[in-house]
Amino acid sequence: MYHDDSFFGFVRDMPLFFQLFFGFVSLCVIGVFGLVLIRGMSIWISNSRAEVRKTRCKVVDKRTEVWGDSARTTYYITFEFDDRTRTELPVPPQKFGLIVVGDVGELTYRGTRFIEFARF
């Protein structure tokens, strides 16, 4: 009898329950990866299609989010517009340090993408 030493031979020799279980887990992992990829692409496309907006606003809050094993940091600033609505945008670290809570100026952004903040 021929015995296959490859990975697929190993899988073929496993009980049916394990084959189904690991197949299901593999499909779930691939599905989640696909959903994350699709969501990221839709946000990128939405931002690319949005108009560039310039509006007067005030900086009302700043925060950071540290994540991952390599301690990656994302920087966020909350801007309040003249009509009292607010938006929080991720900003580059070099801009985060230059903008202070209470600053008033003109925010330039596109969708959820920060472009520039110029103080008055």
Image: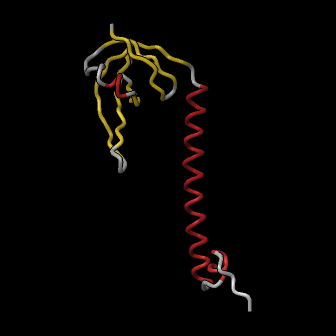
Image colouring: secondary structure
**Residue 118 against residue 94 in the figure, above or below:** above
Task: Tell me which corner region of the image, top left, top right, bottom left or bottom right, holds residue 93.
Answer: top left
Task: Tell whether 7 sits left or right of 72.
Answer: right
Q: Which one is in front, 66 or 5?
A: 5
Q: Which one is in front, 89 or 91?
A: 91
Task: Tell me which corner region of the image, top left, top right, bottom left or bottom right, holds residue 86.
Answer: top left
The image quadrant where one finds the N terminus is bottom right
At horizontal 31% and vertical 13% (from top left) the residue drawn is 104
At horizontal 60% and vertical 52% (from top left) the residue drawn is 34
How far across and how far down the image is residue 15, in percent? 60, 86
At horizontal 57% and vertical 20% (from top left) the residue drawn is 51
Report the residue that reaches farthest toward the bottom: 1
**Residue 43 against residue 36 in the figure, above or below:** above
Report the residue that reaches farthest toward the top: 120
Q: How many numbered marks appear?
A: 0
How far across and how far down the image is residue 26, in percent? 58, 66
Task: Tell whether 51 sits left or right of 80.
Answer: right
How far across and how far down the image is residue 59, in percent? 31, 21
Q: Which one is in front, 71 or 3?
A: 3
At horizontal 59% and vertical 70% (from top left) the residue drawn is 24
**Residue 15 against residue 64 in the figure, above or below:** below
The image quadrant where one finds the C terminus is top left
